[in-house]
Amino acid sequence: MARAASTGRTLITVAPTGAESTKEDVPHLPTTLDELVATAKACEAAGAGMVHVHIRDATHRPTLDPVRLRDTVAALREQTTLVVQLSSGGAVSDPYERRLRVLDAEPDACSLTMGTVNFGDGVFMNSWPFIVELYQLSQEREVVPEFELFDLGHVTALRRLLDGYGLPYGGAVHADLVMGVPGGMPGDTSTLVTAVAALPTEVTSWSATGVGRSTLAVALAALSAGGHLRVGMEDTLTFAKGRPVRDNAQLVERAAQLATLAGRPPMTPDQARQLLNVKAR
Ligand code: KMH
Ligand code: ZN
C-alpha cells in the first residue's frame, strides 16, 4: 500500500502563516518578515526541513507582491538552511497571473494544487490550463513543485499531468495530501490510506497535512503509513482541545516527537534538499 520513506527519516514542513487567519484574530501569527524569519529559525531548530511560505503586506493582509516575495526568499536563505517553498496558491481571491509570477522570486520549491476545491465559504480555483501552465513554468524555472492534493480527484489529475507533461524539475515527485478542509477530503485514516494507494507510482515521497481538528489524526496516520508531515499555524490554531497553539515551533516540536517515536526522526534541511532534489541556488 504505502510507499515507505526511503531515507528512514521524516520531512517536517512548517506552514507558519497561510492566507486565511487575520492578525486581528491571531496576533501571534507571523505576518511581518521579521516574525516569519524568527519563526522559521525556531522551527528549523525544532526539526523542520522545509518552510511553506505565504506572505503579508504592511497591513498584515495576504499579498503576492513580487518584491516582497523576493525579499522573503532572500531573508529565509540568509538566516536559515530550510528548503524555501513559496505558496503559488495564495488566497482564494488571487488571480492566476499573480500566482504564476510567484516563480519570479526563484524559490527552491512551490506548491502546485491539482484541482479546484471548495474552501470554506470560498472556492480555491485551479483550472486544468492553469495547472499545466504553472507546471511547465516550474519545469522551465527549475523549481520543484509540491503537488497539493485536497481531494481524491486531485490524485487523478496528478496522474494526468505526469502522463501529459513528464516529470518535474529534478525528477523527484513529492505530493502533499491536504486533508480536512471544509469542501475537500476528510482528515481521517481510511481516506489517507485510500489516497496513498491511488498515488501514481512516480511519486517518490508524500506528506500529509490535517487541517483544524484533523491535525493529530492525520499526522499519526501518515507516520504509520510511511509518509512525511506538514504542520503549522496555516493549518491549525488549536494545539489540543481548549488550548490554542503557542507558536509554530510548538507544532513542529510535537511533529518531531511523533516522528521520533515512529522510528523516523526528522530529516535535516540538507536531507530534505536531497529528497526533493532541489536546485542548488
Ligand atoms: N490559501 C489557500 C486558498 C497553497 O498554498 O498552495 C491555498 C493554499 C494552497 O494555501
Ligand atoms: Zn498554503
Image (cartoon, helix red, strand yellow):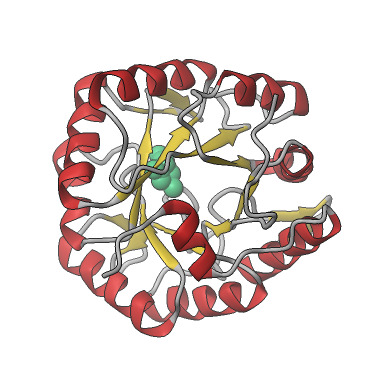
Q: Position of residue 229 (x, y in %)?
A: 63, 50
State the quadrant of the C terminus.
bottom left
Whether residue 212 appears in this view of the structure is: yes
Residue occupying image coordinates x 57% and y 74%: 44
Q: Where is residue 86 in the image (x, y as percent from the top left)?
A: 34, 56
Residue occupying image coordinates x 17% and y 41%: 137
Whether residue 61 appears in this view of the structure is: no
Q: Position of residue 245 (x, y in %)?
A: 70, 62
Question: In screen coordinates, is 17 left or right of 127?
Answer: right
Q: Nearer the viewer, residue 47 or 54?
A: 47
Question: In screen coordinates, is 211 left or right of 244?
Answer: left
Q: Nearer the viewer, residue 98 or 224?
A: 224
* In the image, residue 193 above or below residue 47: above
Displayed quadrant of residue 268: bottom right
Q: Position of residue 33 (x, y in %)?
A: 37, 76
Question: In screen coordinates, is 264 left or right of 44?
Answer: right
State the quadrant of the N terminus.
top right
Displayed quadrant of residue 192: top right
Residue occupying image coordinates x 36% and y 58%: 278
Looking at the rendered structure, the number of numbered marks drawn on it comes to 0
Residue occupying image coordinates x 37% and y 75%: 76
* In the image, residue 234 above or below residue 1: below
